[in-house]
Image (cartoon, rainbow, N blue to C red):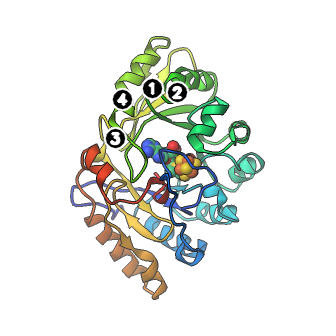
């Protein structure tokens, strides 16, 4: 039975866990220009604490966990956590979102210990653009990571591209062409505002615009999706690859949101765009029981708003930066 039902009747079965706020890239849309103050090791949840919280969430109805960050793979011995989470009763999907810079040598191993799904973030195939967007020079490693992931045969493999007008929107078709012959999906993500991420409304390329551009060359047809899916999914006529759009800005999906977030320092965030947090870490360290942990999680759910505020308000709000939440 799912106990994770909020004030507006939404059922939550999906937990996104940030394992670190650190990253080896500095994407302009994610990491504030002046950087962030990294959390100290003791502020982060330990793997034991993440495991315990995840087990309680699974008992309450979560069946899908995604590891994110910062860059999850910069945290030491991440495979130890993955192995433990994969064994939790009730977890059907164990996913990770990564920039893939560190993926190549370990992709097969992660698949073999129970990671089922992988989303890899890449916004350009061009070297100079990659360096401008990520402020690092790591494109070759990312491409190597993507090919290793293809070989490792994950149940689900997706590319995430944040589309920004005048920055990389001329590469939309290149991404469609990259996935079209593979068992792979590309997700075009509308640029979202966060604290100090130089977001501007005129840099957003909407779902409709992206779709129209692709339709000029390929025939897209809608695929059936779960009610809670955040992506609008499409097949590409004549090809195995698929295309999706995350339209958080032009057509928000708050009404069917099934996600909860656990930050690397142990706060539950019930909404990506809303500052309210519930501190599980300090309570855990005071020795609370699983029963109290459940009650705190239910309290966090009561803080979830019906819908996120308009984009300009989000951009001005005192929320965490994206790199501190994990998407
Ligand atoms: N480091 C990992 C990565 O890049 O995949 C995981 C963390 S990252 C914060 C998770 C996802 O959020 C990435 O796909 C990234 O492209 C996306 N993201 C970050 N900032 C964004 C923004 N302002 N708008 C839309 N998507 C964003
Ligand atoms: Fe790092 Fe991912 Fe944010 Fe880029 S999007 S700075 S890779 S956390």
Whichever of labels 1 and 2 marks the residue nearer the N terminus, that label is 1
Q: Is residue 77 left or right of residue 47?
A: right
Label 4 within 8 A of ligand 1 by Cβ: no
Q: Secondary structure at mark 4?
A: loop
Whichever of labels 2 and 4 marks the residue nearer the N terminus, that label is 4
Gap between marks 2 and 3, in whole Å? 18 Å
Residue under the point 42% across and 69% down? 267
Q: Position of residue 125 (x, y in %)?
A: 63, 29
Q: Is residue 160 left or right of residue 279?
A: right
Give the residue pinned by disc 3: 227
Q: Quadrant of residue 38?
A: bottom right
Asked whether 298 or 264 is in front, the reply is 264
Label 1 within 8 A of ligand 1 by Cβ: no
Question: Most extreme residue toward the right, as rendered?
Answer: 105
Q: Which mark is residue 206?
A: 4
Whichever of labels 1 and 4 marks the residue nearer the N terminus, that label is 4
Which of label 3 and label 4 is nearer to you?
4
Which of label 2 and label 4 is nearer to you?
4
Gap between marks 2 and 4, in whole Å? 18 Å
Whichever of labels 1 and 3 marks the residue nearer the N terminus, that label is 3
Gap between marks 1 and 4, in whole Å? 16 Å
Pointers 2 and 4 in contact (C-beta within 8 Å): no
Image vertical order of residue 267 relative to residue 144, above or below: below
Q: Which mark is residue 242?
A: 2
Give the residue pinned by disc 1: 234
């Amino acid at each position: 039975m799912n106990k994770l039902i909020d004030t507006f009747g939404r059922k939550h079965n999906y937990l996104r866990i940030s394992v670190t706020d650190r990253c080896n890239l500095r994407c302009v849309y994610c990491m504030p220009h002046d950087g962030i103050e990294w959390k100290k090791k003791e502020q982060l949840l330990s793997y034991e604490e993440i495991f315990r919280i995840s087990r309680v969430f699974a008992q309450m109805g979560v069946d899908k966990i995604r590891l994110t960050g910062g860059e999850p793979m910069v945290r030491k011995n991440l495979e130890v956590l993955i192995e433990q989470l994969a064994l939790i009763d009730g977890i059907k999907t164990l996913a990770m979102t990564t920039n893939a810079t560190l993926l190549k040598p370990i992709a097969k191993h992660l698949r073999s210990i129970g990671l089922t799904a992988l989303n890899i973030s890449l916004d350009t195939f061009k070297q100079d653009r990659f360096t401008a967007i990520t402020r690092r020079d790591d494109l070759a490693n990312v491409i190597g990571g993507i090919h290793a992931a293809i070989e490792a045969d994950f149940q689900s493999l997706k590319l995430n591209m944040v589309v920004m007008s005048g920055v990389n929107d001329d590469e939309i078709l290149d991404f469609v062409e990259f996935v079209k012959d593979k068992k792979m999906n590309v997700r075009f993500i509308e640029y979202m505002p966060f604290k100090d991420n130089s977001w501007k409304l005129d840099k957003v390329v909407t779902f409709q615009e992206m779709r129209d551009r692709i339709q000029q060359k390929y025939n897209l047809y809608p695929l059936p999706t779960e009610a809670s899916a955040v992506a609008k999914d499409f097949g590409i006529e004549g090809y195995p690859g698929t295309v999706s759009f995350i339209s958080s800005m032009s057509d928000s999906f708050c009404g069917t949101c099934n996600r909860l977030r656990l930050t690397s320092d142990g706060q539950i965030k019930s909404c990506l765009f809303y500052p309210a947090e519930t501190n599980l870490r300090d309570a855990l360290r005071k020795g609370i029981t699983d029963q109290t942990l459940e009650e705190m999680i239910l309290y966090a759910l009561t803080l979830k708003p019906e819908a996120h505020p308009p984009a300009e308000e989000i951009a001005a709000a005192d929320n965490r930066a994206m790199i501190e939440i994990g998407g």
